[in-house]
Image: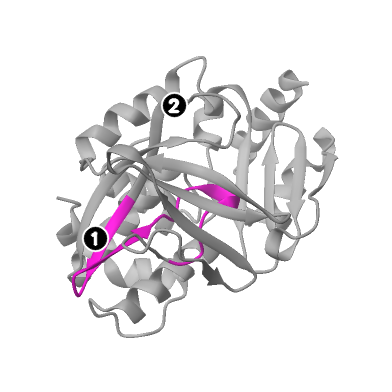
Amino acid sequence: MWSGDELDLDAYLARIGYAGRPAPDLETLRGLHRAHVRSIVFESLDVLLGRPVGLDLKDIEDKLVRGGRGGYCYEQNSLLAAALERIGFHVSGRAARNRTRGALMPVTHALLVVTVDGVRWLCDAGFGHQGPLEPVPLDRPGTEVRQGEWTYRMRAEEEGILALCFLREGEWRDLYAFSPQHAYPVDWVLMNHYSSSHPRAAFTRQLIVQRAAESARTALIGDRLTVVPAGGRAPAVSRTVPVRELLPLLDREFGIRLSDRDGTELVRRYRAED
């Protein structure tokens, strides 16, 4: 289903810095998830640069594994799904509705559900700076899950819908919600087409680069750099990033180094956003 037999697993493990011997158990699942999120940033620069976002595993490997770049949810979770499938996990996809933007959004977010010893876990390496560092259990709604300084929980709603919630500044905030219906790679292709080409999609209108870390959560959206302090207990700190700082900041904060050609084009489009 996820082309796991085509994955260069050794190259993937080296990319995320995972040094253990992977097995289809919970310890491996947690370790892989955390290593992936720590090592591969969320970014949609190719969309802003007017390039198609390919979801064939080879395209994803060339970009995220061998190319040292990041990606957004379809790329990130397709890669994670291939690795987990190759190791022997049972992996299924879901499609979610983002709830962070204060309006009713279309179902465009891709995530994974992984079953280990009969227990289902939400796995998501592609929700950006507010996403989980490790898997979150699906079968115990309401249970608070601490991941270092950060806290998550699932909330059950009508019709089998589950919502992932994030504790920030003392309040629970919905991140996204999804139904029990399975989503397949072909569904993600359709969702990716909207997200990468529709004029109203967020990724076609502004630069978005984000990193989830144990110490802080960092997001560059448009020309605003926002840092959420550890645990989300204090208010976020935000500032405007002038165009002269853009490329050095991408390198310093997110580990993204573009070619001269791509850097020049990104700066041109960044100026056009002002």
Residue 30 seen in this snapshot: yes
The CA distance from mark 2 to mark 1 is 24 Å
- Mark 2 vs mark 1, foreground winner is 2
Indicate which disc residue 25 carries. Answer: none
Is 73 on the left-hand or right-hand side of 161? Answer: right
Task: Tell me which residue sits at (55%, 71%) in the image.
Answer: 146
Q: Quick one: label 1, few (<14), some, or many (20+) residues within 10 Å?
A: some
Residue at 40% over, 65% down: 135
**Residue 31 percent location from the top left of the image:** 41, 76
Location of mark 1 (residue): 7
Residue farthest to the top, as pictured: 199
How has the structure been colored for display? one colour
Q: Is residue 216 positioned above or below 171 on the image?
A: below
Q: Earlier in the sequence, mark 2 or mark 1?
A: 1
Residue 222 falls inside the magenta stretch: no
Question: Mark 1 is on which residue type?
Answer: Leu
Give the image location of residue 80, x and y in percent. 34, 58
110 shown above or below 115? above
Q: Is residue 26 left or right of residue 224?
A: left
Any part of residue 256 in sight:
no
Q: Estimate the x, y position of residue 92 in percent, counting from the top left.
A: 22, 52
Q: Which residues are magenta?
A: 112-134
Could you classify mark 2 by the number of other residues whose Cα lies within 10 Å: few (under 14), some (14-19), or many (20 or more)?
A: many
Mark 2 secondary-structure assignment: helix
Circle 1 — which element? loop
User: What residue is pinned by disc 2?
Assistant: 196
Kindly give the residue lying farthest to the front in the view shown.
158
48 or 132, which lies in front?
132
